[in-house]
Image (cartoon, helix red, strand yellow):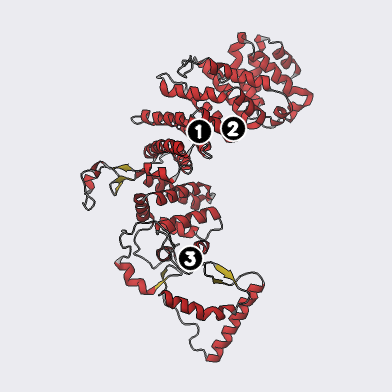
Amino acid sequence: MDAEQLKRLERKETAYIADILTQFNTKNADLLVFDSFHTDNLWHDLWLAIFGILDDESLSSLHAQCLNTVRILTRDEFSLQTHYIEQELGTLLSLARINGSTSSNSDDDGTLPQLTLSDGEADVIAESLKCICNLVYQSADCRRQCLRQHSLDAIVKRLNSATSCATRYPSTLEYYDMKLLFLLTALEPTARTRLQIDLNGLTYMTNWLDDKLTESATAAVSDEQLNIICELLKVMFTVTSAPDKSPNEYEIQSLHLTGVLRELLLRFGNLSTERERAVVTHAINLLTNISGSCLSELLVKCSNAETGTENEAVSANAKCCAVCFEKRNVRSLAVLLDYLRGGLAQQESEASSHELLSPVLTVLVKCARSNRTMRHYLRKEILPPLKDVSKRPEVGNELRNHLCRFLTLPAMILRDLSAELLFVLCKEDVGRMIKYTGYGNAAGLFAKRGVLDCRRIEGTDYSSDSEDSDTEEYKQQQQSFNPVLGCVEQPKRNPLEGMSEEQKEYEALQLVNLLEQLRKDGIVQPALIDKDGKPQPLEHILQLQEELPQQQFEQKRKT
């Protein structure tokens, strides 16, 4: 922009403003580096000229273009930090109708006085919200000013209006309201507290989400609405990350929220599009913040639960739902497992990060710990009764195989979550865990839990009426089952066959010397299992021989 064009903007020459702004906005639509604007104070002069037009109501027809220019300028973090822009932010909040005055002028029932907007008014509000989002992201001072001018209050009232009135704001405004709400709550801790405690925002947002799902029950949901739902779920995630309400009050809210999230999983569980998958992803992230005692709301009692009996064999035609298990609709759990399978396939094909899988594994662990029916269903799907034990547990493409491979990953979060899930599904029974995963794969978990000596964990609270998981195929091969590998090991030739006693003794001493050298070099660290069931480092490899009689005695005593 040359000096003459800037002067015309400052003088508000209406005959030239539209063309100048159109040219500037088109040329700089993707601009991210503003070094050329830092010379001759160009950025600040253009900023003041544009806001001079925005403050003039007689030029309202040009406001949308001006706000587009402001949105470009707000990408320059350096200029925002070096200039005082409190007055300009106040103008943007007024144009977006989320400043203190619009909040105080709302009706007594909490709704805004004007819900019907012209296209021009909607464009101005949308562009203003985009500018504010940039400012809130770039500047802590702007975030604090938004809170001082009660922007949160205005957005929540607008959200309440969307749930209580037949007339709705345009989808674009709903989206950027949610976007701004997310940025404020994610970057400003005081905003989370105010939204949750003072404004009861979680209740409003849960009701709004419930209304959206009710509306879409008989019609397809547009991509715009899916984007809005994603942003809302992100806001709810930040708010519930550190709940400030009393435990009882928060649990009541969480029960309602979990029920709504269940309906969301049922509605978009087919994962047919990327946006539907994004909705389910954010719903799973939100479920990680819900306490385990509330996750039972993911199950729904089947309609035949009242008429059937526990031992009654219900035919497929008599089932009340697509996924009925122990007289509960477990479709939401099936969606979580389908999502996990999709994430595993994506990880192997694209070598993506593990962050996609850790939330769903966290939710599955909490479900398995909190509810017996959930644990039974997850065990049936993840750890079905063993039939083919000819392959190692980590070989294959079933969920059990994937989780067993994770047990030896260097990624600690994914490794620990996988181990926790498998151990809970095994009712924290060491013997059952070894059968499904192999002692070698589970050794890290056993060391952490202090059960390397295969002792039973005390104090576990699991039902004892589960069915016998040993199949006939497993029983036939049980004698050949190698518990360390977790599979039947094929017979191998004895490496000591044909050796004399002197040769055997020589090889044994060589092995001891090699192990001692590895220990000295810090490559391995031999250990014994102490009384707490955890590994205790040795000072010398020959200590293994000294402790052998005591270990043999302890083993005989246990058996």
Which residue is more in the foreground, 527 or 42? 527
Secondary-structure class at tag 2 = helix
Q: Neighbour class for label 1 at 10 Å: few (<14), some, many (≥20)?
A: many
C-alpha distance separating marks 2 and 3? 44 Å
Residue 435 % position (x, y): 40, 66
- Mark 1 and 3 residues: CB-CB less than 8 Å, in contact? no
- Residue type at mark 1: give it: Glu
Secondary-structure class at tag 3 = loop
Which residue is more in the foreground, 236 or 536? 536
Quickly name the residue at label 2.
190
- Determine whether, in the image, residue 79 is placed left or right of residue 219: right
Which residue is more in the foreground, 10 or 448? 448
Residue 56 in view of the camera:
yes
C-alpha distance separating marks 1 and 3? 44 Å
Q: Neighbour class for label 3 at 10 Å: few (<14), some, many (≥20)?
A: many
Instruction: Say which of marks 1 and 2 sits in front.
Output: 2
Quickly name the residue at label 3.
451
**Figure check: 504 above or below 182:** below
Identify the mark at residue 231; answer none if there is no mark: 1
**Figure check: 279 above or below 132:** below
- The disc, 1 or 3, on the residue closer to the chain's N-terminal end is 1
- The disc, 2 or 3, on the residue closer to the chain's N-terminal end is 2
- Residue type at mark 2: give it: Thr
**Figure check: 188 above or below 528:** above
- The disc, 1 or 2, on the residue closer to the chain's N-terminal end is 2
- Residue type at mark 3: give it: Val
C-alpha distance separating marks 1 and 2? 20 Å
User: In the picture, which quadrant includes the N terminus?
Assistant: top right
Residue 544 % position (x, y): 56, 78
